[in-house]
Amino acid sequence: MITNQIINGEDTLSLGAKRRQCLILPAFVLGVLAGLVSVGFQLALAYGEAIRNQAIGLAHHYPDIGLWLPRWLA
């Protein structure tokens, strides 16, 4: 862990360590946002697949609609 030591009134924390400390919070926030986007994408894929499966089931249940459904959705 990086600790901040003050000796004779001067900060001994290196410039690189200071930059890393400043980037911890933005990196964490960006990681959380990336995770939320990926979860949203996975949910969108799952819902899309469910809708597609319902449309296929409808097409099998009602053959007359099943012939025209792909043309209407295209």
Image (tube, rainbow, N blue to C red):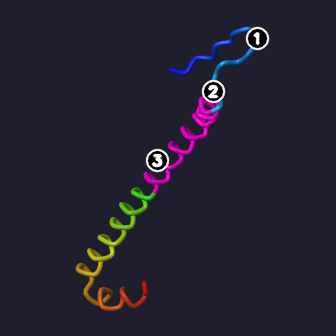
Q: Residue at x 39, y 57 (%)?
A: 42
Q: Residue furthest left?
A: 60
Q: Which mark is in front, 3 or 1?
A: 1
| Real-space Cα separation, disc 3 to disc 1, in angstroms | 42 Å
Mark toward the start of the polypeptide (2 vs 1):
1
Image x and y of residue 33, in percent: 54, 47
Residue with the mark numbered 3: 35
Q: Residue at x 70, y 18 (%)?
A: 11
| Real-space Cα separation, disc 2 to disc 1, in angstroms | 15 Å
Residue 11 drawn in magenta: no
Mark toward the start of the polypeptide (3 vs 2):
2
The residue stretch that appears in magenta = 16-40
Query: Magenta: predominant secondary structure element?
Result: helix
Residue 20 disc label: none
Viewer-side residue, 7 vs 51: 7
Residue with the mark numbered 1: 9
Q: Residues within 10 Å of mark 2 (few under 14, many from 20)?
A: few
Q: Which mark is in front, 3 or 2?
A: 2
Image x and y of residue 72, in percent: 43, 88
Q: Callout 3, which amino acid? A: Gly
Q: Residue furthest right?
A: 9
Q: Residue at x 44, y 59 (%)?
A: 41
Question: Label 2's element?
Answer: loop
Q: Callout 2, which amino acid? A: Ser
Residue with the mark numbered 2: 14
